[in-house]
Amino acid sequence: MFEKVLIANRGEIAVRVMRTCRRLGIATVAVHTDVDAIAPHVRAADEVVRIESYLDIEAVVAAARDTGAQAVHPGYGFLSERAAFAEALEQAGITLVGPPAKVMEQMGRKDAAREIAVAAGVPIVPRGEDAGFPVLVKAAAGGGGKGMRVVRAHDELEEAVASARREAASAFGDDTMLIEKYVEHGRHIEVQVIADSHGTVRHLFERDCSTQRRHQKVLEEAPAPTIDEATRERVTSSAVDLAAHVGYVNAGTVEFLLDADTGEVYFLEMNTRLQVEHPVTELVCGGLDLVEHQLRVAAGEPLSIGDVELTGHAIEARVYAEDSFGGFLPQAGTATYVRWPEGVRVDQALETGQVVSTAYDPMLGKVITHGATREEARQALVAALDDTAVLGLTTNAGFLRTLVAGEDFRDAAIDTAWLDRHEVPPPDPAPARELAAWEVFLRDETQEGPFASDGFRLGAEPAPVVVQLDQPVTLTVPPAYRPVAAVRHDRVEVVHHGQRFVFERPDVMGDHGPAVAGGALTAPMPGTVLDVRVAEGEPVEEGQVLGVLEAMKMELSLKAPFAGTVTTVGAAKGEQVRLGDTLFVVEGADEAS
């Protein structure tokens, strides 16, 4: 077994790998950029090395060599599926905890993997040019929903390909695109495989990852709740055949698309790394540790996983820094208070006082529950998300809670495009507003002085207490519990059922000024201006793209709200902007006259 392992990643996956290494007595090395200088994964490691970028192959290999690490665990994302990285480690005499470079090159690219699947007798999804619209444009390298676009008409194809290319180049350093049939009502089924260097290939059953937004998984579960034994046998045996055919070694995931309308199953791709959702497999397979088996296989040991039976059901919720009820836009800022649930598995790397940057993927952690039945696991996840609280920035915890508690997820009726077709209703702010008002009252009640109110009225019952927030709140029955809240002189934050609410405290003496004109486009998220396509004085048509904003590897096109003339361009290409900054102002013809 290795004595020292470098983890070429950050965030929760780096902390999770270090946890297993510590249990096995393996020393760990963390790499970090300046943004992550005091991040949890840095503090969890035995040694640390500063690098400029997590995508810098030369720097990561040098860090492993200089610290005497015998192996590198890549986690997921970043360099985890870059064959050039695997090859550089091989040349340096350092073991990658993953497949050989040649296999990674073949299976890590969706175009090459498709041809191998055909040779292995695995069914594949038709190519777009053969299937017609709608099609899915996706990056040939990488995964995680980056560089993917659904295109429904030919005139949308050029812009979609250009945008996907930029996103793929940023995320993976490779902008090669594939175009293939888009299945309208598909379920995302994937099979966990693991193989050793002695010819043994095993599957650890399947997962269902159909709850997605923008091709990024939101909820994952194991086993898949809607497939029969025949389909389970078909996908698991196909996954093993494919891995054996290509000579795969270490942990990997073979992804399939189940057409809910026809029952057909198509091979999508193979992820040549550990998956974000691996905890649900670990929980339903008796609590085995996939990272431990990855390390043992990488060290040359034969696979030691015996017969595994499915035990119960597990569901994972990915907690992101994003405003799910505001277009899923990335959020950033300082997490002034963080509370993760107890009694369930939580893989996370976010703590109170930590700064969440737009520089990296917005996932903050994962909340995973296990139960004897799917319904037991689902109800446990609802309760766990109720106990999840982050103040200072908005997360999707409240959205996840609403989704998991809903009938469609309860009935396993959500397919991969469900979130594109359905609006998840935002939670009612009234209960949170009353909790916030009680928090204000209970804190103000402790104040002394001539302006402290006791509710006394001469010859009458005490006056009802009214707290002024964005709306007046008349306090009646005290809440059964004190909420997670932060009170400042100008606003109150409160978390209710996982959702963060912010209520303003009116400033009666303030100068509120005029509202911003309807033609102003402000930054809906903090980020970097990737492109500015217009100049001041230029006429534009309604819907014309004025510029492109990027944050956390997600692009957003800013379009003219109506035809008119650009009167203001508030940012230049490459400039960092804050949430709410005015980027463009368009003046309509009526306003100009």
Image (cartoon, rainbow, N blue to C red):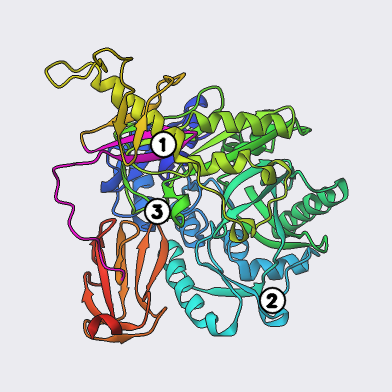
Q: Amino acid at mark 3?
A: Pro
Query: Mark 3 or mark 2, which is nearer the start of the sequence?
Result: 2
How busy is the neighbourhood of tag 3: few (under 14 within 10 Å), some, or many (20 plus)? many
How busy is the neighbourhood of tag 2: few (under 14 within 10 Å), some, or many (20 plus)? some
Q: Is residue 223 left or right of residue 19?
A: right
Q: Which residue is mark 1?
A: 349
Q: Amino acid at mark 1?
A: Ala
Q: Is residue 535 magenta?
A: no
* Residue shown at the point (26%, 86%) measured from the top left: 538
Q: Is residue 93 above or below residue 530?
A: above
* Residue shown at the point (79%, 56%) measured from the top left: 238
> Which quarter of the image is occupied by the N terminus?
top right
Q: Which mark is residue 330?
A: 3
* Residue shown at the point (78%, 59%) measured from the top left: 260
Which circle, 1 or 3, is nearer the viewer? 3
- Tally of numbered tags: 3
Residue interval drawn in magenta: 490-518
Q: Is residue 570 visible to us here?
A: yes
What is the residue that sits farthest to the top in this orientation? 459
Element marked by disc 1:
loop
* In-front residue for pair 399/470: 470
Mark 2 and mark 3: Cα distance apart in space: 32 Å
Q: Which mark is residue 127?
A: 2
Q: Which mark is residue 319?
A: none
